[in-house]
Image: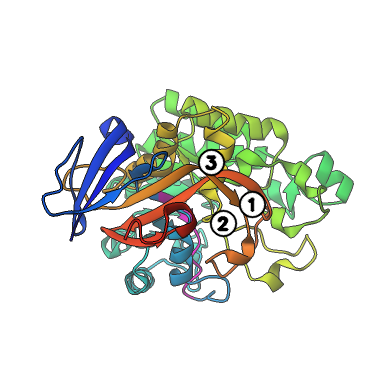
Amino acid sequence: MKRLFKGGRVVDPANGRDGLFDVLIDGDRIVRVAKDIPPDGAHVVDVPAGFVVVPGLFDMHVHLREPGQEHKETVATGTASAVVGGFTAVACMPNTTPINDNAGVTEYILQKAAQAGLARVYPIGAVSKGSNGDQLADIAELRAAGCVGVSDDGRPVKTALLMRRALEYTAMFNMPVLEHCEDPSLKGEGVAHEGYHASTLGLRGIPGVAESIMAQRDIALAELTGGAVHICHMSAMESLRAVREGKGHGARVTCEVAPHHFTMTDEALASPVSYDTNVKMNPPLRAAADRDEMLKGIADGSVDCIATDHAPHHYDEKKVEFDVAPFGIVGLETCVPICFDRLVHPGLITLSRLIELLSVNPSRILNVASGALSDGAVADITILVPDLQVTVDPARFKSKSRNTPFGGWQLKGGVAATIVGGRTVYMNDAAAGAGRFK
């Protein structure tokens, strides 16, 4: 069926659009984006004033947990969470059980995603076999099976030599290496940012330099090899400095920042509740100066993407002592409201820049054909409501897990509908009105 989305504000940075346009869809494809398109038998959808039609959002760093950790999340529940959050696509990390280091696991994940029929799923394969850092995984096999990048995720690539080989190998396939930057010897047994608040609570610290030293190593190797390295969940100001310098030298380096790292600081360790494991993540919440530098990087273009690092954990796993709780929080359903409330509405960035961070750039980095409302493109579309009042209620999450520090936050900005391949897979009735986008 043809559908004509009429009269909405279209923000499409890849095509230089920001204004009132019509969007005509036929089946799973965009036919045309232009002003005053005649219906010619298409079902007309009047986009309400104030709503914004954008290319489908893409979270390039999530953990879907399946196979092997289905008590935390499954591909079905994770992609359900994604579409509620406005994401038409996600890239899932390889730290499953077993590790996604071979075609069999990759194909299993893709099969589960096809069965769910919600957000598109792009697997990230492991750099090394078992993510043990000893021997390269068969990257060619992973690529052929559908992986769009490689990463050892929660573990940094163990040696500079292995990282060099990974960058050389992936360069042949035009794939990035997505790196969790961390010097294990400096991290030690740390569980929180090394600073005043961790010290007062008796928590072992992780200094920012533990992240930046590894970032500097990997950026230097990217410059040496011509390979592409992507710095995951950047949190330390020294890491951003290394990224800026690397880009200045022509290194193929990109980076992402998670919403919790540009909104919160290590003060949350003690307030409003001390030892709340929902503020335990890796890398940890840093000092205010680090947080502010992440905001500057988002505003000045140094930061390429916003990614959630969606890391679901079962309630029982988080309801333990801070030291032994797992790192990580969920983020797919809170990302858009946080970005509107803390970045767009205060005037730090424009809406067009936000779409670059959440759609255009992730697609470009992973070489995925998305991120633009172009004639003939697949109809992956997100409809946003910048002025929607949102109260974060973890009990309503579609994710299996509830581990978030944002519960109860009141934010401005949200999602009206998520359309994947021309199908409306999520509609916020409170925002859109029942049946409006069907």
Mark toward the start of the polypeptide (2 vs 1): 2
Amino acid type shown at disc 1: Asn
Amino acid type shown at disc 2: Gly
Mark 1 or mark 3: which is in front?
Answer: 3
Q: Nearer the viewer, residue 393 or 64?
A: 393
Q: CA distance from mark 1 to mark 3?
A: 20 Å
Q: Bounds of the magenta span? A: 58-67
Give me the disc on residue 154. Answer: 2
- Asked which secondary structure carries label 2, the reply is loop
At 50% from the left and 48% from the top, the residue drawn is 414
Would residue 405 be found to the left or right of residue 170 on screen? right
Q: Which residue is mark 1?
A: 282
Would residue 216 be found to the left or right of residue 55 on screen? right
Give me the disc on residue 339. Answer: 3
At 52% from the left and 62% from the top, the residue drawn is 132
At 65% from the left and 35% from the top, the residue drawn is 291
